[in-house]
Image (cartoon, helix red, strand yellow):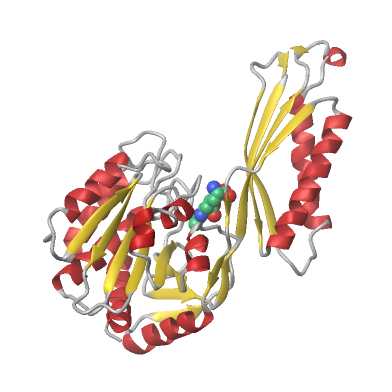
């Protein structure tokens, strides 16, 4: 597929962002493309709103997996694109439109240019939540076509186009979502002494949660607690009976995750006592850290560095989460960052990745996958 065709695909996909397990139009769009390839070259199976596409090898000894996540985010787009999201309140603000397009570029190449081994493309739903990687991997199709090696990329707005960055070992953090519901006693704004105000309790709780990273986590370790959303109350002159905090926890180890959760529970319990309220904690979905297989990552970095003109950097680990962590926990593999240079970062309403990065990824991964699939 040529550059213009891929850019059209990216823009089409950008227009139809859908959140986890709601990617119906996205799935249909991808299936329509896959239908155009000869059935004897690519076998397609759907899984929930995701897709497995197996490109047949000529004399397969193994299967190489390539995963692209397909969901968007609940963000109101603020780019100046003339191909903005047509789904109000939703946006591809994490680059999954790029990830899918690059996978299609690779798939179309290997359909037309067969290699020895099979290549399995996994178009995976719900990376942003509640997590599609683990159940997709446990599906019957994944068991039947289980890859021997798996790889995936993520766009990086901080890096210039033409740059690839990764590292052996830990790349992305352990994550856990965090939802805390507080219930007190509402009432008239002028009679606070007869109520237990959940706006005040939730503000205090947010502030206290900040002390966990600064006071309970080893300064040489790293952790993040972000509360991204607070809701509570009804109108300005009623004291709020309910409040809800929604956030996420990131740590570099499972032990730190457990410790952070213990401290959250203790602090929430303290708020219950201090503000005479009831609290319910729900950890939502949790993602396994992304731990890159050392030998494969080093081989990949050397290979790309030697066989392309692109810059290959060793980066630091990041506190981002990725359910691809489950895949590399079970299958040897790695993930890497692809430079797409944007003034606004991931999860920002103005994210505008540079589309020339699509060709960079397609070219580099055609070379790498051909090398692995012919050896
Ligand atoms: C690459 C990326 O941005 N991934 C997301 C994964 C979110 C997992 C989950 N919903 C959570 O918030 O913990 C990220 O926010 O890092």
Q: Seen in the image, is 244 located left or right of residue 70?
A: right
Asked if residue 206 is positioned above or below residue 303 in the image, the reply reads above
Residue 367: x percent and y percent?
Answer: 28, 80
Q: Quadrant of residue 269?
A: top right
> How many discs mark residues in the rendered view?
0
**Residue drawn 75% across the image and 34% down it:** 203
Q: Nearer the viewer, residue 81 or 206?
A: 206
Asked if residue 93 is positioned above or below residue 98 in the image, the reply reads above
**Residue drawn 18% across the image and 53% down it:** 33
**Residue drawn 80% across the image and 56% down it:** 214
Q: Seen in the image, is 117 located left or right of residue 173?
A: left
Q: Looking at the figure, which quarter contains the N terminus?
A: bottom left
Residue 303: x percent and y percent?
Answer: 38, 86
Q: Looking at the figure, which quarter contains the C terminus?
A: bottom left
Residue 208: x percent and y percent?
Answer: 80, 43
Residue 342: x percent and y percent?
Answer: 42, 60
Q: Nearer the viewer, residue 302 or 14?
A: 302
Q: Seen in the image, is 33 located left or right of residue 71?
A: left
Q: Is residue 161 visible?
A: yes
**Residue drawn 37% across the image and 69% down it:** 147
Q: Is residue 123 visible?
A: no
Q: Seen in the image, is 224 located left or right of residue 41?
A: right
């Amino acid at each position: 597929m040529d550059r213009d065709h891929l850019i059209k695909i990216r823009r089409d996909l950008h227009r139809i962002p859908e959140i986890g397990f709601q990617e119906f139009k996205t799935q249909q769009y991808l299936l329509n493309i896959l239908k155009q390839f000869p059935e004897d070259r690519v076998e397609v199976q759907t899984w929930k709103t995701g897709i497995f596409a197996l490109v047949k090898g000529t004399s397969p000894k193994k299967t190489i997996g390539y995963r692209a996540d397909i969901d968007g985010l609940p963000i109101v787009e603020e780019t100046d694109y003339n191909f903005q999201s047509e789904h109000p309140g939703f946006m591809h603000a994490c680059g999954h439109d790029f990830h899918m397009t690059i996978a299609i570029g690779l798939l179309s190449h290997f359909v037309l240019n067969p290699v020895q081994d099979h290549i399995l493309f996994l178009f995976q739903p719900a990376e942003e939540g509640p997590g599609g990687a683990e159940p997709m991997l446990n599906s019957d199709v994944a068991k039947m076509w289980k890859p021997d090696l798996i790889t995936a990329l993520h766009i990086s707005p901080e890096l210039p186009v033409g740059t690839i960055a990764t590292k052996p070992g830990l790349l992305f953090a352990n994550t856990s979502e965090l939802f805390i519901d507080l219930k007190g006693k509402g009432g008239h704004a002028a009679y606070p002494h007869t109520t237990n105000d959940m706006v005040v309790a939730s503000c205090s709780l947010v502030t206290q949660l900040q002390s966990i990273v600064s006071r309970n986590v080893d300064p040489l370790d790293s952790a993040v607690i972000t509360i991204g959303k607070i809701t509570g109350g009804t109108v300005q002159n009623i004291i709020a009976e309910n409040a809800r905090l929604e956030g996420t926890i990131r740590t570099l180890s499972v032990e730190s995750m457990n410790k952070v959760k213990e401290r959250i529970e203790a602090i929430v319990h303290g708020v219950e006592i201090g503000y005479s309220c009831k609290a319910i904690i729900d950890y939502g979905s949790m993602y396994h850290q992304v731990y890159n297989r050392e030998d494969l990552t080093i081989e990949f970095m050397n290979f790309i560095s030697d066989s392309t003109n692109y810059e290959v950097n060793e980066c630091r680990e990041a506190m981002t989460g990725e359910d691809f962590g489950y895949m590399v926990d079970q299958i040897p593999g790695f993930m890497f960052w692809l430079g797409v240079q944007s003034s606004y970062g991931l999860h920002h309403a103005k994210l505008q990745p540079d589309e020339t990065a699509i060709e960079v990824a397609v070219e580099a991964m055609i070379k790498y996958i051909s090398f692995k699939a012919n050896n």
